[in-house]
Amino acid sequence: MSDDERVEAVKGLLSDYVRSPSLRHIRDMHSLDRLAKEIVRRVDRGNSIWRKWIGERDAFLRSTLFLWIPIEDVRDFLNGMPGPKLTKTDVAQRLQVFEQEAHEYAPPNPDLQVECLAMYAKEKAEGTEMAAIVALLRDYVEMFYVHASEAQREQEQQQREEARIAREQRLLSGADCPWTQMQGSKCKYCRVNGRTYRLSPTEDKKWSLCRVDSVSDDEGGGPPLGKYLRRDDATKALEKLAYQPEPRW
């Protein structure tokens, strides 16, 4: 592969990568690692044992990955590009290599297959050229994953909020519970052995631990029981403090 071809190959990969509508995806270290590996593979392609895959054939075939376009149609399009004649087996086996590489990072979603096949058949019947169909399907698949990722984040956020509310209700009910931050509060509360404790943030970015009678940031509470850098340190201290005799305040 000449220097010019190497530059164009890298430019093509970077161009495809930044087309993603999701900044979260672009900045994701896992995705960047995948891109880096693909750049190395593309640059080293000149030493490949796959002799028929010259020019842009590899790049085009890879762009059809997990789009479920019929192999025969892909083969016919590739044979219209410069290079030796490809058979169906050539295309299927080369595509299988790409699939095996990609499975580690993004296994295909079978839910997309029916929709992709329907979109392909419609565009083909209307006379849309192959490259345009592939771009259309790729955009559709990418947006599907973006929306799926957003839906998953919303679901996880909802689950975290539901868990927070459950902890808050448990705390207010008088039951023992782990550290809980009431909505709108700057402090954290927990109850161990029927005793309520509060962690209050300090000016030196630590946590001050004290015993309280109620869940209220305004309550003075008992004398400080310790100052901790992390919440886990306070939790460890309470494993003993919560079961020791308390002084009368």
Image (cartoon, rainbow, N blue to C red):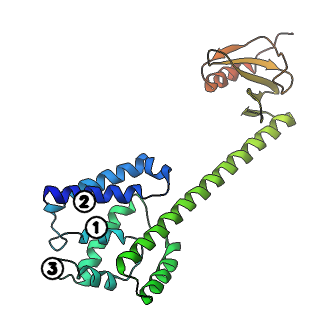
C-alpha span from label 1 to label 2: 8 Å
Mark 3 Cα-neighbour bin, 10 Å: few <14, some 14–19, many ≥20: few
Q: Residue at x 72, y 45 (%)?
A: 161
State the image quarter where residue 241 is shown: top right
State the image quarter where residue 124 is shown: bottom left
State the image quarter where residue 98 is shown: bottom left
Mark 1 Cα-neighbour bin, 10 Å: few <14, some 14–19, many ≥20: some
C-alpha span from label 3 to label 2: 20 Å
* Residue contact at pointers 3 and 2, CB within 8 angstroms: no
Mark 2 Cα-neighbour bin, 10 Å: few <14, some 14–19, many ≥20: some
Point out the tag, 1 or 3, that comes first from the N-terminus: 1
Describe residue 5's horizontal placement relative to residue 207 as left or right. left
Amino acid carrying label 3: it is Pro
The N terminus lies in which quarter of the figure?
A: bottom left
Q: Nearer the viewer, residue 41 or 241?
A: 41
Point out the tag, 1 or 2, that comes first from the N-terminus: 2
Describe residue 42's horizontal placement relative to residue 235 as left or right. left
Q: In this view, does 89 lie above or below 1?
A: below
Q: Which of 58 and 91 is in front in this view?
A: 58
Dot 1: what SS?
helix
Q: Nearer the viewer, residue 95 or 167?
A: 95
The C terminus lies in which quarter of the figure?
A: top right
Amino acid carrying label 2: it is Ala
Pointer 3 residue: 84
Q: Which residue is drawn at 33% across and 55% down?
A: 14
Q: In this view, does 29 lie above or below 43?
A: above
Pointer 1 residue: 59
Amino acid carrying label 1: it is Ala
C-alpha span from label 1 to label 3: 16 Å
